Image (spheres, rainbow, N blue to C red):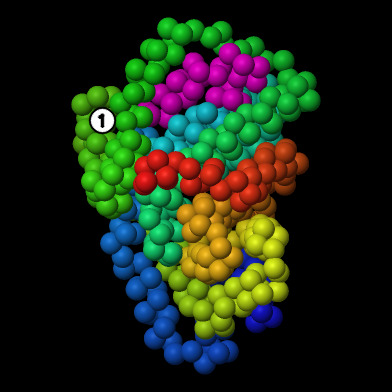
Amino acid sequence: MLSVALVFLVLILFIFLGFPVFIATILTSLVFIVAMDIPFTVVIIRIFGGIDSFALMAIPFFITAGNIMMETGITDRIVAFANSLVGQFKGGLGHVNIVSSMLFAGIQGSGAADASAIGSVLIPAMERQGYDKDYAVAVTASSATIGPIIPPSIAMLMYSYYTELSVGKLFIGGFIPGVLIGLGLMGVHAIYYRIRGYQIPVTPFSLKRVWKEGLASLGALIMPLIILFGIVFGIVTPTESGIAATVYGLFYGFFISKKLTWKKIPRILITSATTTAVVMITLSMAGVLSNVLVRMNFQRNVVDLVVHTIQDKYLASLLIMLILLIIGCFVDPAVMIPMFASTLMAAGTAMGFDPIHFGVFMVIVMQIGAITPPVGTFLFISCSIAKIPLEESVKAMIPFTLVIIGVAVLVLFVPPMSIALNRVFFP
């Protein structure tokens, strides 16, 4: 285990030296490949072979579908609908931010896209209403974690690929925890709205406005149903559901919202290709490092630790959670999933957990790393929009982060939260 710990120390060192995460990952891999006298052919095989998968083809289609919908002005539609639902509560725009993320999660499946799209609209709006910048960032970044949890989810898709679990079951398993995180964040916001002494006017509730905004948003909100029910009922594979979502996005943009034009298509494709390239190169480099960890018997050591050394499966799971939270401060979830997914599934199975239950729990835990400094992706995006240093938002983030950790622990101790709906859809 000392050699494994050294791997992560070297990885963190490269990250602190300013290397991009994927470069830091491959450099760390090369250091230990040389030290362990592993053939360099392994690097080539893992870089290309690690992403040569039909299942992973779903990722570019999900990203493209989401970008098409954003180009049609879907962000504004979602925010307006969320405002009609919860804008009347004290702290209305903060609640709107969180509910918008819950709705947006069903369209994009990416926390980074959520933080960027919702944050670019609502962080400036919250500032204009009188919210502090650090607080607007905290609400936005924390609610962005819902994106990879409520289906469809790129993180769940990746976890499914590396563990060979049913992506449909993982999608369904993330629904209740994702909603609970959203409700928990709204509860914290309601409390801190009063603690910070905000006195901001709210939007009066109108059933007519809810109906109007709901109808206006209905065409966009159908997309998650296409993806989710298509996979769950076996009509399409995850990759085919991504294609269906992309086709529907084009139909929605050209014929329903009528905001999509052929001139916008090249920009959408270039943006989607760029985002996909970032994801895929990160996965391929993490695959090399994962192979190094396998050669160090990382999986066997973890299983031995949690099964034989720590007798209580819940205590062992909490220890794993603590380790992932620490690593998550320095390593992006997109890297953690390929590095740890198979090991975590083996550990969970050895401890007697349902694989879907434990998988949902682990995905939630790994997403917390995206809002913890110094490498929190969602936090960095939100701070960039607000134009404040990362460290200014840390204090405001604490209560929201604790809510997400609390829901993760609840998922661990209450398995029906992640598997009850699966028993309905997969009897």
Whether residue 26 is visible to the viewer of this picture, yes or no, is no
Q: Position of residue 103 (x, y in %)?
A: 45, 32
Picture layout, residue 27 above or below residue 278: below
Disc 1: which residue: 252
Whether residue 6 is in magenta: the answer is no
For badge 1, the amino acid type reads Tyr
At x 30% / y 26%, what residue is drawn? 219
Seen as rendered, the residue at the extreme front is 427
Whether residue 311 is visible to the viewer of this picture, yes or no, is yes
Q: Position of residue 19 (x, y in %)?
A: 57, 66
For the stretch drawn in magenta, what is the main secondary structure?
helix
Seen as rendered, the residue at the extreme bottom is 37
Picture layout, residue 202 above or below residue 328: above
Residue 145, image quadrant: top right
At x 23% / y 46%, what residue is drawn? 235
Picture layout, residue 382 above or below residue 30: above
Mark 1 Cα-neighbour bin, 10 Å: few <14, some 14–19, many ≥20: many
Whether residue 19 sits left or right of residue 224 in the image: it is right
Pick the residue in front: 296 or 256.
296
Q: Position of residue 243 (x, y in %)?
A: 25, 47
Whether residue 16 sits left or right of residue 244 in the image: it is right
Quick one: quadrant of the N terminus? bottom right
- Secondary structure of the residue carrying tag 1 is helix
Q: Position of residue 122 (x, y in %)?
A: 55, 28
Provide the residue span drawn in magenta: 72-96
